[in-house]
């Protein structure tokens, strides 16, 4: 299709420079540039991602927050001890009175 466009001077200069540098025709560079920009046309600009900070509570005494593995190990140890304790209580209740 043949049409007449009014292109800003600085844009036309850039398009002509690309055409000269790449050895392509000016109208081919214009078409490729328009085609590359079409998917973005009508798409609203994205707002920058922002995340509000919130307090996660105070520090836990006895733990250095710079040592996350120490905290994880302590939590895991506490959970193992709780399970062993619960298992021990179940054995004592079921082993005392056989029917």
Image: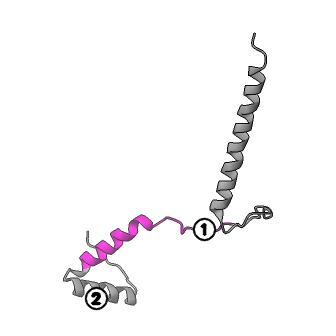
Q: Is residue 22 above or below residue 55?
A: below
Q: Residue at x 69, y 54 (%)?
A: 74
- Check disc 1: other Cα within 10 Å, few if <14, some if 14-19, many if 20+: few
Marking on residue 49: 1
- Check disc 2: other Cα within 10 Å, few if <14, some if 14-19, many if 20+: some
Q: Residue at x 62, y 60 (%)?
A: 69
Q: Earlier in the sequence, mark 2 or mark 1?
A: 2
Q: Are marks 2 and 1 in contact (CB under 8 Å)?
A: no
Residue 66 lies in quadrant: bottom right
Residue 57 lies in quadrant: bottom right
Q: Quadrant of the C terminus?
A: top right
Circle 2 — which element? helix
* Range covered by the magenta-colored residues: 27-51
Q: Is residue 96 above or below residue 69?
A: above
Marking on residue 68: none
- Of residue 72 and residue 29, the one placed in the foreground of this image is 72
């Amino acid at each position: 299709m043949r049409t007449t466009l009014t292109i800003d001077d600085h844009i036309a200069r850039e398009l002509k420079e690309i055409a000269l540098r790449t050895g392509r025709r000016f109208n081919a560079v214009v078409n490729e540039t328009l085609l590359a920009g079409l998917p973005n046309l009508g798409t609203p600009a994205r707002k920058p991602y922002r995340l509000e900070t919130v307090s996660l509570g105070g520090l836990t005494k006895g733990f250095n927050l710079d040592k996350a593995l120490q905290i994880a190990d302590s939590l895991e140890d506490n959970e193992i001890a709780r399970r062993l304790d619960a298992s021990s209580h179940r054995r004592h209740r079921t082993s005392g009175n056989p029917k």
